[in-house]
Image (cartoon, rainbow, N blue to C red):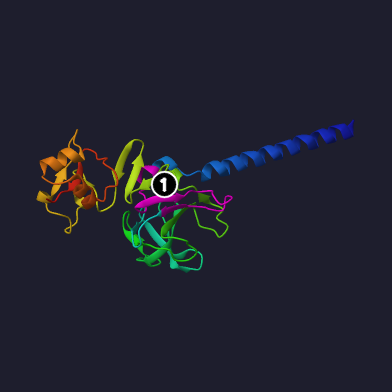
């Protein structure tokens, strides 16, 4: 009888231990889950280009996304942060690591040129480098990674960048400085402003007569007719890759 009670107590203790381990693991997992929705609302795409590869390809070894584009295409910081690393790697080539207030680390690899140094503070939309094909790259593109908390050599904390930037399939064009929020498109780079954000305008921006504030119902075609210019010219001046515009967007307009 005493042995039976002893075995019974041991079984209960073991069950409690297993439960505590399970709860502890779940707690740790939940605590480390990023607030992706909040980050997604403010992050911008790091470069103009075409998605040439996505996260998890190459038998799961590709821990980022690739954006193919022209040599020296500007590479932008997706969010405010501090440069953790800026160096040349035999694999990444010219590469920049940025730590963000959201506790993510972003990696920008294969750059032709790096414009920032370790310890430097950067603002969202700052040009941190230019697109290239340095390191182990077969063509001109940006390899972009996101990591929770820290970058590790084994990339244990890697997260699919599309979770934070929005879904983009291979072959789809993306625009540097643009953040997708549902069906709306916002731009946070110095090439785009709204009438509610005039404080961001720099002295190098065009004068008021060279700009146009988009109104409800406007299209690029209707604006081109009003200002005696062409749709292609407007898109070129504003680095637009589509005809999508929104109310209060400030467009650069030149005849």
**Quick one: label 1, few (<14), some, or many (20+) residues within 10 Å?**
few
In the picture provided, is 220 more to the left or to the right than 170?
Answer: left
Q: Looking at the picture, tell me which residue is in the foreground, 233 or 151.
A: 233
In the picture provided, is 179 more to the left or to the right than 2?
Answer: left
Q: Which residue is drawn at 33% across and 49% down?
A: 175
Quadrant in which residue 134 is drawn: bottom left
- Say if the magenta span includes residue 72: no
Q: Looking at the picture, tell me which residue is in the foreground, 98 or 237.
A: 237
**Residue at mark 1:** 171
In the picture provided, is 213 more to the left or to the right than 120?
Answer: left
Where residue 125 appears, as percent x and y from the top left, is: 31, 54
Q: Residue at x 39, y 66 (%)?
A: 112
**In this picture, which residue range is highlighted in magenta?**
39-67
Where residue 35 appears, as percent x and y from the top left, is: 44, 42
Is residue 102 visible from the viewing direction of this image? Answer: no
Q: Residue at x 24, y 39 (%)?
A: 246
- Say if the magenta span includes residue 41: yes
Is residue 5 visible from the viewing direction of this image? Answer: yes
Quadrant in which residue 109 is drawn: bottom left
In the picture provided, is 213 more to the left or to the right than 10?
Answer: left
Q: Which residue is drawn at 49% across and 47% down?
A: 160
Q: Is mark 1 on a helix, strand or loop?
A: loop
Where residue 116 appears, as percent x and y from the top left, is: 36, 65
The quadrant of the rendering that contains the N terminus is top right
Q: Looking at the picture, tell me which residue is in the foreground, 135 or 193.
A: 135
């Amino acid at each position: 009888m005493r042995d039976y009670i002893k075995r019974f107590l041991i079984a209960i203790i073991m069950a409690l231990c297993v439960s505590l381990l399970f709860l502890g693991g779940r707690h740790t997992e939940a605590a480390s889950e990023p607030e992706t929705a909040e980050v997604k609302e403010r992050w911008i795409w790091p470069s103009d280009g075409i998605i040439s590869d996505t996260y998890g390809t190459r038998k799961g070894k590709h821990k980022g996304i690739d954006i193919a584009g022209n040599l020296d295409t500007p590479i932008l910081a997706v969010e405010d942060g501090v440069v953790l690393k800026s160096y040349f790697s035999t694999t990444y080539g010219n590469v920049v690591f940025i730590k963000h207030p959201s506790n993510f680390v972003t990696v920008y690899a294969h750059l032709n040129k790096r414009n920032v140094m370790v310890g430097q503070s950067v603002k969202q939309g700052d040009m941190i480098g230019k697109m290239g094909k340095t390191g182990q790259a077969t063509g001109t593109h940006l390899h972009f990674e996101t990591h929770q908390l820290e970058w590790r050599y084994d990339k244990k904390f890697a997260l699919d960048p599309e979770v934070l930037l929005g879904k983009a399939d291979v072959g789809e064009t993306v625009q540097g400085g643009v953040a997708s929020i549902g069906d709306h498109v916002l731009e946070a780079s110095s090439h785009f402003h709204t009438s509610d954000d005039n404080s961001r305008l720099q002295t190098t921006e065009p004068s008021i007569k060279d700009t146009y504030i988009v109104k409800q119902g406007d299209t690029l075609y209707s604006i081109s007719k009003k200002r005696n210019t062409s749709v292609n010219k407007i898109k070129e001046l504003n680095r637009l890759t589509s005809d999508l515009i929104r109310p209060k967007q400030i467009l650069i307009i030149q005849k």
